[in-house]
Amino acid sequence: MYQKSGQQDSDNNIYTAVPLGINNSHGAYNVTRERGFHIIRVNGSSCYSCWYFIRIDLKNTVASRYEFNVADVVDNSGAFFDMTVNQDQKLTVRGNSWQRTKFVLDSMDNWVLRTVVATGDLQVFIGLNPDTVDKGGHVWSASTATGRDVRISVKTTDADFHLATYYYVYLSSTSGQDAEIQLELIQDRTVNYLGSNFDYTFSYKHALFLEWTIKQKFQFTTNKEEVKFHVFRVPPPSTNPGYHNVVI
C-alpha cells in the first residue's frame, strides 16, 4: 500500500501520509508468488514536491522474500538542454525548425522567461510534458506577434507554477529566416538575513503598551511558500585555517 504528501495534498503531512491500512492509502495490493509482481504507475503531473510512503506487510517474515524498486519512465526529456537561472544565452533557431530547453526552479518567487528575437519569427511554448509541449500540451506561450521582446511572466500565485518541477521550453521558428535570439530565465530569489542570537526577523514596540516588545518570527505566509532562503555572517577566524561552530 502507498500514500503521498505534497504541494497538492494540503490535508496530508509526513505523519498522516504514512499508510496504516486500506482506508488511508491511495492503493493496496496483494502480491503472491503465484501472481508474480505488481506495477504501480504514477503520473508525474499528479503530484508536485511529493514524498511517497510505501508500506509492505509480510505474513511470514521468515519464509518471505521480496524485491522492490522505483524506475523513471522513459520520455523525451533528454532532448532538452538545461537552462540556468539569471544566465542569458544566445541561440540560433533555423528557419522553420526548433530548439528545445528545460529548467527547474527551487524558489517560488515570480519569474520571467525572456526571449529577445533579433531576426526571424518565433513562438515560445512552456509545458510540463516533454512529449506534448509542442503538440498543444503547453501551459504558457508567447510569440513575436506582439513584438521582438517576447516575455512569459509567471507569478507565485499561478496555479501551474510548481517548485522543483521541470518545465520544458519549445522554441519554434515560424518563418524561413533563421531566428537569432537571446534567451534568459529571470528570477529574483527572496533571501532573508539571519542575525546571530536572534530567532526573529524584527522587533518593535506595541502600539498601545509601549513597554511590550513584539517579536516577529520567520513563518510561511501562504501554502505556495514551501521554501525559505536565509543568509548569515560569521566573524573572521583568529587562526588560519579557522573554524566556527554554527548552530541553526
Image: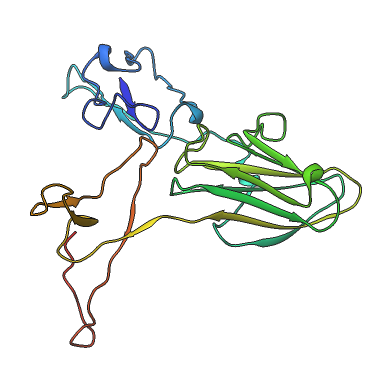
Residue displayed at 79% across by 48% down: 147
- Is residue 118 positioned above or below 169 on the image? below
Residue displayed at 44% across by 42% down: 163
Q: In the image as oriented, which residue stretches furthest toward the right?
A: 176
Q: Position of residue 207 (x, y in %)?
A: 18, 49
Q: Position of residue 138 (x, y in %)?
A: 65, 33
Q: Position of residue 135 (x, y in %)?
A: 72, 30
Name the quadrant containing residue 97.
Answer: top right
Left or right position of 50 against 23: right
The number of numbered discs placed on residues in the rendered structure image is: 0
Left or right position of 214 against 110: left
Left or right position of 18 against 97: left
Q: In the image as oriented, which residue stretches furthest toward the left?
A: 211
- Is residue 47 positioned above or below 173 on the image? above
Return the residue nearer the eye: 155 or 235. 155
Name the quadrant containing residue 175.
Answer: top right
Left or right position of 82 against 148: left
Return the residue nearer the eye: 153 or 202. 202
Residue displayed at 32% across by 23% down: 2
Which quadrant would the C terminus be assigned to in this image?
Answer: bottom left
Q: In the image as oriented, which residue stretches furthest toward the front?
A: 208
Q: How is the image coloured?
A: rainbow
Name the quadrant containing residue 33.
Answer: top left
Q: Position of residue 11 (x, y in %)?
A: 29, 23
Which quadrant would the N terminus be assigned to in this image?
Answer: top left
